[in-house]
Image (cartoon, helix red, strand yellow):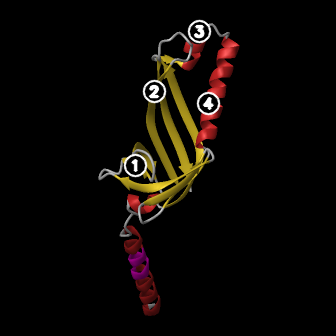
Amino acid sequence: MKGKTLIIKNLMIILFSGILIVSCEKDKDPDEKIVGTWNTSTGKFDATIDNKPLLQYFTEQGLTATDAQSAVAFFNTAMQQSFAGSITFKSDNTYTSNLGGQNDSGTWSLNSNRDKLTLDPATGDAFVMNVDTLTDNELVLSWIETGKEDINDDNVQETINVNITMRFTK
């Protein structure tokens, strides 16, 4: 009986030690989580022209409902293709990417709250995105693109806003 008690006691010590070690493991730093190669998974693109959703804008421009829906679908497909690919974040705070068939490289950084990711390409201006999710195997980034262009040839530039949300997986 004394032998069984000793075995049970030793098993309990081992069990509690294991639980203590596992519960004390430190979560990965967000900078460590982002390091690696991320592949685009899905994208969501909400676009407006002069504060009107694309479907409404195209319909008001005289397209049939079917043609307007086709134009919106074409826009979404083109946007998906322009972001298809991967980006690799390295531990030395450099990155390389191939998105939409375009290669890019530069440096990256996360702000102190770890909710903003800045990409600073070797050529061009730095670009800041919201970090909506960052886990060991999922990265969700969002940002807004704004521009002006005369879309309907009326000699007046329309304001274009595109809310972009991209999901990446390792």
| Local crowd size for mark 1, using a 10 Å CA cut-off: few (<14), some (14–19), many (≥20) | some
| Local crowd size for mark 2, using a 10 Å CA cut-off: few (<14), some (14–19), many (≥20) | few
Q: Position of residue 23 (x, y in %)?
A: 38, 68
| Distance from Cα at disc 1 to Cα at disc 3 | 38 Å
Q: Residue at x 37, y 67 (%)?
A: 26
Q: Which residue is mark 4?
A: 76
Q: Which residue is mark 1?
A: 117
| Local crowd size for mark 4, using a 10 Å CA cut-off: few (<14), some (14–19), many (≥20) | some
At label 3, the amino acid type is Gln
Q: Residue 57 appears in which quarter of the rendering? A: top right
Which of the two labelled residues, at mark 3 and mark 4, occupies the earlier sequence position? 3
Q: Which residue is mark 3?
A: 61
Q: Which residue is mark 2?
A: 147
Q: Residue at x 36, y 53 (%)?
A: 110
- Which span of residues is magenta-colored? 13-18
Q: Determine the secondary structure under disc 3.
A: loop
| Distance from Cα at disc 4 to Cα at disc 2 | 17 Å
Q: Residue 31 appears in which quarter of the rendering? A: bottom left
Which of the two labelled residues, at mark 4 and mark 2, occupies the earlier sequence position? 4
At label 1, the amino acid type is Leu
